[in-house]
Image (cartoon, helix red, strand yellow):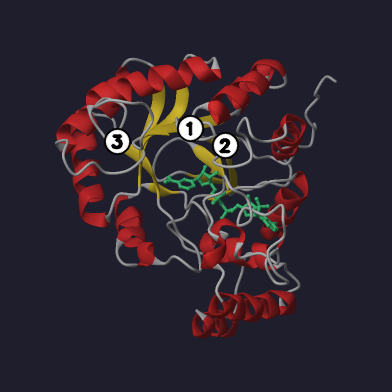
Amino acid sequence: MTYNPSTSRYQNMQYNRCGNSGLKLPAISLGLWHNFGDVDEPQNFRDILHFAFDSGITHFDLANNYGPPPGSAETNFGKILATDFKSHRDELVISTKAGYTMWDGPYGDWGSKKYLVSSLDQSLKRMGIPYVDIFYHHRPDPETPLIETMTALDLIVRQGKALYVGLSNYKPAEAKEAFKILKELGTPCIIHQPKYSMFERTPEQGLLDLLADEKVGCIPFSPLAQGMLTNKYLKGIPATSRAAKATGFLQAEAITPERLNQINSLNDIANNRSQTLAQMALAWVLRQPAVTSVLVGASSSAQLADSLKTLDNLSFSEAELNQIEAIL
Ligand SMILES: NC(=O)c1ccc[n+]([C@@H]2O[C@H](COP(=O)([O-])OP(=O)(O)OC[C@H]3O[C@@H](n4cnc5c(N)ncnc54)[C@H](OP(=O)(O)O)[C@@H]3O)[C@@H](O)[C@H]2O)c1
């Protein structure tokens, strides 16, 4: 069936400027790490993409290795892009990354110019597009000189294969140095992608302040702690959940009795706010002034619908924040 996007798609989304760049991102962006691989159901992920775009989500986040198998999320996204979104490419911000293991041998991992340039070429081929909007270095490389990795990002932009560049999983000191090099090269870093949620607060130890100071955007990943910060695990581990799946990155052992106690207490606060726990967890991340957008995953349109309602209540009272802090 032909897909006709909703004509009201821009009415309910909030768009935030990404650092001091010209680019605006939706407050909620969709990631394709899980649920879009060859192991997943094509009609389901097609529905999720339609629902996302109909709801004003313009930003879709990929990486070379998303699947499984690695690369299949880009291929599957590319197929839907070529059909359903063909006339809407200029309404989309598509990102991809390289930095984790992608192919055998010494050139398919980490941060060399050799790896980044050829990986992006492969990603573009899989997605069937001439350029991405944002290309990230996925994780810092302790061996490759930072200048080489940053020069590769600059080259990629000059080649017209990406419009903007970003960094992911860089700690504050290495991020600061990378920002300096990129600025000098003339290709400023516009965005950083850290792991940040109520259960993973490392970015509060300097990274969020650095991004605010440097006016670099921030798009936290796994803001729902891969589903733990939702009502999904309150009554055990559902068979279809990420924690139960053989291909998921969330281990069932992570859901300890202590975690469940925290999740239950947080769920009570969310109920008092007339929100679901997922909505409260996303609002809690979005309350940080440095945060441009939260990068959620979803295994169904219904989950995404739940997450999108976050935007109805983004504010917290001092008392609520204190209660949450006491639980965390
Ligand atoms: N840069 C990096 O190193 C890096 C690393 C990881 C992720 N990322 C990016 O961040 C994106 C998001 O990561 P993530 O998938 O871990 O994010 P997440 O939003 O923390 O978790 C998503 C999962 O939570 C569950 N869920 C989502 N909404 C729900 C709701 N309303 N109610 C109940 N359950 C809900 C679903 O799990 P079920 O499948 O169990 O239903 C869903 O797959 C990725 O797709 C990727 O683009 C980047």
Residue 239 in the image: above or below residue 7: below
Instruction: Give the crowd class for mark 1: few <14, some 14-19, many >=20 residues within 10 Å.
Output: many
The structure residue drawn at horizontal position 83% and vertical position 19%, both measured from the top left corner, is 2
**Mark 3 near ligand 1 (CB under 8 Å)?**
no
Query: Residue 254 or 94: which is nearer the viewer?
Result: 254
Q: Nearer the viewer, mark 3 or mark 2?
A: 2
Residue positioned 48% across, 32% down in the render: 95
Q: Is mark 3 on a helix, strand or loop?
A: loop
Spot occupied by residue 199 in the image (x, y as percentages of width and height): 49, 68
Q: What element carries label 2?
A: strand
Residue at left offset 60%, top offset 65%? 229
Of circles 3 and 1, the one toward us is 1
Q: Circle 3: is it few (<14), some (14-19), or many (20+) Cα within 10 Å?
A: many
- Image quadrant of residue 45? top right
Dot 2 amino acid type: His
How many numbered dots are placed on residues in this image? 3
Does the residue tagged 1 have its C-beta within 8 Å of any atom of ligand 1?
no
The disc, 3 or 1, on the residue closer to the chain's N-terminal end is 1
What type is the residue that disc 1 sits on? Answer: Ser
Residue occupied by mark 3: 188
Label 3 to label 2, Cα distance in Å?
A: 20 Å
The residue singled out by tag 1 in the image is 95
Determine which quarter of the picture holds residue 184. Answer: top left
Mark 2, residue position: 59
Amino acid tagged 3: Pro
| Separation of marks 3 and 1 at Cα, in angstroms | 16 Å
| Left or right position of 153 against 163 | left
- Who is closer to the viewer here, 292 or 193? 193
Seen from the viewer's position, the closer of residues 125 and 285 is 125
Indicate which disc, 3 or 2, sits on the residue closer to the N terminus. Answer: 2
